[in-house]
Amino acid sequence: MVKLDIISDPICPWCYIGKTLLDQALAQRPDHPFEIEWHPFQLNPDMPAEGMDRRDYLETKFGGKDGAIRAYAPVVERAEAAGLTIDFAAIKRTPNTLDAHRLLHWAGIEGCQDRMAMALFQAYFNEGRDIGDPEVLADLADSLSLDGAMIQRLLATEADREDIRTRDAQFRQMGITGVPTFIVGGQHAVPGCQPTDLWVKVIDDLTAAAS
């Protein structure tokens, strides 16, 4: 097996698109060698714990409504090309994602981290759910046969908060400034939203090297 580390944030549309393109390659190469692990990177580490109105967030970040529309036009185009329909109009709040990263960490312990990562993307980008809300996170946990009530109790504590912040800071110290970033075999960084064909070639090259 080859470790594939994915550094990501659940509210990053490029991360959702990038993982979808990777999944398309994995479907073409079902005997791929990848063992996937997700890692935390908060796009907005200073976001208030309760999040903020999405329109206010976007217009502040991109200098007004027109700037936000221009910034997201290539996202919509690339998502549609990947077969995704992202419902940006349904997203009312931009959350703080610390708790979502905690849930991803716990899902990893239970062996369903990759499915949880996609569930978070889908909840946020397709359903407009607030993935900073503990009740939403507990519901997602239940949907993957985790104990949602236990997850909600854990979210009310300090469990693993500092660990997530520390890991996030370590990736920044490594020079990672944007997500998604994929690290293949602990050595080769593949930044950004890469096409399916590239991932197929990477898989084929790894398979050939191991034979």
Image (cartoon, rainbow, N blue to C red):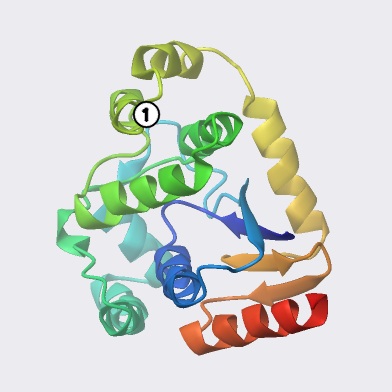
Q: Quadrant of the N terminus?
A: bottom right
Residue 114 is situated, as x and y percent measured from the top left of the image, at 49, 48
> Residue sitting at 22 percent across and 52 percent down?
91
Q: Residues within 10 Å of mark 1 (few under 14, many from 20)?
A: many
Toward the front, the furthest residue is 211
Toward the left, the furthest residue is 89
Identified by mark 1, the residue type is Ala
**Left or right: 165 with respect to 143?**
right
**Left or right: 5 with respect to 44?**
right
Residue nearest the viewer, comparing 36 with 96: 36
Quadrant of the image occupied by residue 85: bottom left
As drawn, 144 above or below 27: above
Q: Quadrant of the C terminus?
A: bottom right
Residue nearest the viewer, comparing 122 with 110: 110
> Residue sitting at 31 percent across and 73 percent down?
68
Residue 193 is situated, as x and y percent measured from the top left of the image, at 51, 77
- Which residue is labeled 1 in the image? 141
Residue 26 is situated, as x and y percent measured from the top left of the image, at 50, 70
> Residue sitting at 23 percent across and 66 percent down?
86
What kind of element bears circle 1?
helix
Residue nearest the viewer, comparing 31 with 45: 31
Quadrant of the image occupied by residue 75: bottom left
Does residue 177 appear in the picture of this structure?
A: no
